[in-house]
Image (cartoon, helix red, strand yellow):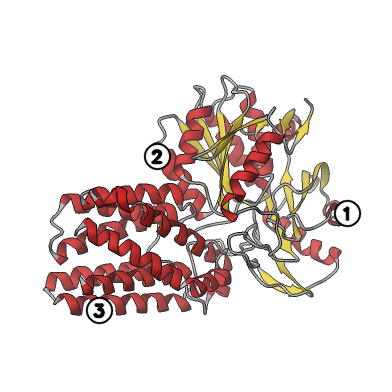
Amino acid sequence: MKTEFILAAAEAVNAAILANEAEIESLDREIGDGDHFINMKRGCATIVSMREELATLPPDTALQKIGMKLLSTIGGASGPLLGSFFISMAKAVKEQDTTSLAGIAAAFAAGVEAIKSRGKSDVGEKTMLDVLIPVSQTFTRLAAEGVERHDLLEVLKREAEQGMRSTRDMIATKGRAAFLGERAIGHIDPGAKSCQVIIQTVCDLAGRH
Amino acid sequence: MKKFINRIDDLLVESLSGFAAAHRDLVTLHLDPNYLTRAQKPNNKVALISGGGSGHEPLHTGFIGYGMLDAACPGHVFTSPTPDQMLEAAQAVENGKGVLFIVKNYAGDIMNFEMAAEMLPFENATVVTSDDVAVENSTYTTGRRGVAGTVIVEKCVGSLAETGADLAACKALGDKVNSRTASMGVALTSCTVPAAGRPTFDLDNHELEMGVGIHGEPGRRREPMRTADEIVADLVDAILDDLKPPQDSEVLLMVNGFTGTPLMELYVLYNSAARLLQERGLHITRSLVGDYTTSLEMAGASITVCLLDDEIRQHWDSPVHTAALRWGK
């Protein structure tokens, strides 16, 4: 993993989140409290604005700085969750070889694990983890099997899409939508949607690199 | 959207600056990270720190001062504050007896305060408020929301902390008051988060949202508009079903406005709720009516009942001097 790729991903994700404003906002208005998109936008803009500061840093330090910055700028539940993701991923990147897909999968898994433990949540609770956990598991498995990069990225995008859609029929047991009970059924979770957009964008970018 | 705004990005800091200037005898504003402290730092007491998303004013900034909070950390509108705010606030107000955080039960608030607590170099504890009975199913692991009852917790724990009581005692009183307090709200209109620019939900002219949260989150159900007495009867039933107060209990009755409902109507709600509580054999010996835990410009209100005992009554009655609550001093 290179810092250059992290910065390019930040730019691309920022653009993709902005391009999906209408959809993410309307999902959050239906079952959230209306601040999810604003928080995501603030987080993306913050990372993009750190470009110069990050450019000369090794990838693990860059990820660590991103995590700490998100923690102090996003607020809400997204701040600690996404902050923990980057901080744990940074630690994993420092500790292992991320020139291989297996190494990147392990670093990603470490980040997802941090979200699970900080949010005390797991798959099936109508949250971003319904996208992140299946994507992470598939990533680890395909990387271990040595699946070709392009095919792997396509599978991950499909997995993210499927995970996002799976939240539609769930009752939320975590997050703001948990207060809605059965009324949340039939609505896709906005956090799961944002994560799907992010994974799709990063996979597309990785495919071109 | 029609609101008094210069630039949306400046709204929070301009509002905090105005608040701090208007109440400079009581509070001092610190920016980047944002937190407010008492103007004069007290000695030899547990430092009480609360915080949460903005848009619920006077919660929590309006309760900084003698007999209540030592500091408050305001987040963006309806968004919890971040750990760096709580850390700096704690550094500023800790004075040797530890820090007690008072946190409303929302996933974001819990996580941000939890991360701050993990990094804090002082002895600390947390009281989580969860007085909203609108969330019916207890299997929701997020649990009940913290709403207007938080004001009663902050008042009583604030009073105890002034006596020099230790951290464990303050935490125990906070948990006790929270367990004896139940609330439920109803919305007649939505609210508009300034940065979103549109109402958080749509409610037509003939509808109300029963059990609404203080961020405009939907509640138990949407129903046709009814008379005040009928609405209050549902709120009081839900609250008493939860609290199960013994006959002849002494209670504090709080009617809290969300901002858009005139005081005139809040007293209609009080009148109706007081009659129902009396019919159920309860004695209302303390009251609070007004806008204390608001939801931007939402029209609507919540009712809170707190089961008093000698200890809670004494701490409710003790002197307080803050921007939003002041008596006996």
Q: Residue at x 26, y 57 (%)?
A: A110
Q: Which chain is home to disc 1?
A: B
Frontmost residue, B201 versus A110:
B201
Residue at 47 percent of width and 78 percent of height: A168
Q: Residue type at mark 1: give it.
A: Met
Mark 3 crowdedness (10 Å alpha carbons): few <14, some 14-19, many ≥20: some
Q: Nearer the viewer, mark 3 or mark 2?
A: 3
Q: Out of B61 and A48, give the one closest to the viewer.
A: A48
| Residue A124 seen from this side | no
Q: Position of residue B231 (x, y in %)?
A: 80, 65
Q: Say which quarter of the image contains residue B49.
A: top right
* B134 relative position to B109: left or right: right
Instruction: Specify the amino acid type for callout 2.
Output: Glu
Q: Which residue is mark 3?
A: A155
What residue is shown with label 2?
B118
Q: CA distance from mark 1 to mark 2?
A: 46 Å
Q: Residues within 10 Å of mark 1 (few under 14, many from 20)?
A: few
Tag 1, which secondary structure?
Answer: helix
- Name the subunit of mark 3: A
Residue count near mark 2 (Cα–Cα under 10 Å), binned few <14, some 14–19, many ≥20:
few
Pick the front one: B273 or A68? A68
Report the front residue among B285 and A166: A166
Q: Is residue A38 above or below residue B326?
A: below
Q: Which residue is mark 1?
A: B264
Q: Are marks 3 and 2 in contact (CB under 8 Å)?
A: no
SS at badge 3:
helix
Secondary structure category for the residue under label 2: helix
